[in-house]
Image: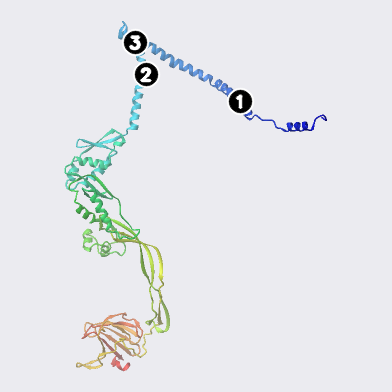
Amino acid sequence: MSNLTKREIVKKIKANGKKKKVNVFGRFYRMLCWIGLKLQFVTYNKRRRISKFFHPVSGRLSGFFRKHVAEPVSGAWNEFLDICDGATGSAGFGATFRQHKGFFAGVVNVVLPMMCIAALAVVVFNVINYPHELEVTCNGKVLGYIEDESVYNNAVRLLSQRTANTSSDYIDSLTPSYSMASVSSSMNMSSEMLCEALLADSSNVESAYGLYINGELCAAARSYGDIQFIMESFLDKYKTGTPGEKVSFMGTTDIISGLYSTDRIVSSDKFAKTISTKRTETQFYTVNEGDTAQSIANVANMSYDRLIKLNENLADDPVPGTSVLLEKELPVLKVQTVRTVKVKEKINYSKKTIKNNNEYTSYSKCITKGIRGEREVVKQVTEINGQQVASEVISSTVTKQPVDAVYEVGTKKPSGVGTGRFMWPVPGVHSISSPFGPRWGRFHKGIDISCGGIYGRTVVAADSGTATVRRTAGGYGLHIIISHGNGYSTCYAHLSAVTISSGSTVSKGQAIGRVGNSGSSTGPHLHFEIRKNNQANNPMNYF
């Protein structure tokens, strides 16, 4: 070691420090080989076990196939070759048949069941893939294939709509008959197709376009473009141009092309008039408590005479629960319009009262005048043929608050006894047309208060008391006498109306009637009397 130089020692250290290179591919290859050998060993053992398990079964199957299939077929084939050689040889076919009749019997026993099975398979396949349908024949002519008889009945209904004058005679002449047929389902005819086939044999039919409303024929025209234009124009009548407005026909409207009777086809002008008319429908109404014949007619928008004509035994006060037949006119073509509108509405003010215990109950004085408010309402309005049928509030914004009205009212109830001090009976009118005293050869027991435009002015009680209302053909006419309970009474004659009832207690200043011209009167005025102990006194002495 001591003989090594320093340089040699360094090289040796470096050589020992270097790592050996690893062959990764070689290791991976050896690992795959090991896995392959392992799998081969395992599968080999599995195959041996499976073969050993199924060996008895496979042996028996092969033996059964050889005994019952291969050998009989081989023998039959050899015998068939012998038959062919004998038939073509000197023996002839008859001798060959007698010699091998067992073979022919076996063939028949095998072939016939196979033919039956094949025939059954064909029938099953035919039933599954080609279902049986009704073949409809009318007046000796096959029209087509339908699913059931209801298709034919619907076709006849459509036929009656497409024809008019000749429909009943032609439909009565149809004598359909049905039979089962195996056809493809694609050959089935709809009611419309069958109707076309029936019309094809009738006379006076043309190709046209019919407008159907909820499945019922409304009218037919020759031009599809005219029908479209007329219906669009009909919608335009109910359009207002409001943003977001929706205008559409109610129900189902279909334009169907086909054959139509010439008497069902109308001109474009008549088509437009037809869809604009109304039709009469009948419906039953159940009478409710309190209903009368007149009220039912008013609600149904019918005349009383028409209601009675439809219901001959209907009483003026029908029994609740009774069914009443009504008529209602409805448009042929209904148009529904839905639009959103913005409107301003008034808000009613409330009424508040302040009690005054010093005034009678007839006293009322306005302290603060009520002012209605305003609000802006957004509504969704629904109309049918221009008539509003529904209105739904979407939003509401108050723009002006209402101001409540305040009234001062009296709470003191009249006692029926007057004060003995009287007030003027016609507020605002103080002119006297005829004073108390002699007049026209007789004694005038009161004063006549009159002026231009006095008719209908309010008359008030001159003092508190109990009122009696009377009406006479002449004399005072409609008049009120108030007994004041203290020996005094007042009379208010020639009235046009009264606002109190006979026997009611009135307070001083309470409105009791209106100036008129009833009874023996030369013109509108109030005849006013004050009596003491039933003796007439000059009223002017009390004011």
* Quarter assignment of residue 335: bottom left
Q: Is residue 376 above or below residue 498?
A: above
The residue that label 2 is drawn on is 110
SS for tag 3? helix
Give the crowd class for mark 3: few <14, some 14-19, many >=20 residues within 10 Å: some
Q: Seen in the image, is 528 located left or right of residue 174?
A: right
User: Which image quadrant: the C terminus?
Assistant: bottom left
Q: Which of marks 3 and 2 precedes in the sequence?
A: 3
Residue 496 at least partly seen: yes
User: Which image quadrant: the N terminus?
Assistant: top right
Front-most of residues 223 and 361: 223
Front-most of residues 86 and 293: 86
Which numbered dot is residue 33?
1
* Residue 519: percent from left, percent from top: 22, 83
User: Given the image, on which type of amino acid does mark 2 rest?
Assistant: Val
Q: CA distance from mark 1 to mark 2?
A: 59 Å
At 40% from the left edge and 70% from the top edge, which residue is drawn? Answer: 399
Which numbered dot is residue 279?
none
The residue that label 3 is drawn on is 84
SS for tag 1? helix
User: Given the image, on which type of amino acid does mark 1 rest?
Assistant: Cys
* Residue 404: percent from left, percent from top: 41, 75
At 34% from the left edge and 20% from the top edge, which residue is drawn? Answer: 112
User: Given the image, on which type of amino acid does mark 3 rest?
Assistant: Cys
Q: Is residue 351 above or below residue 281?
A: below
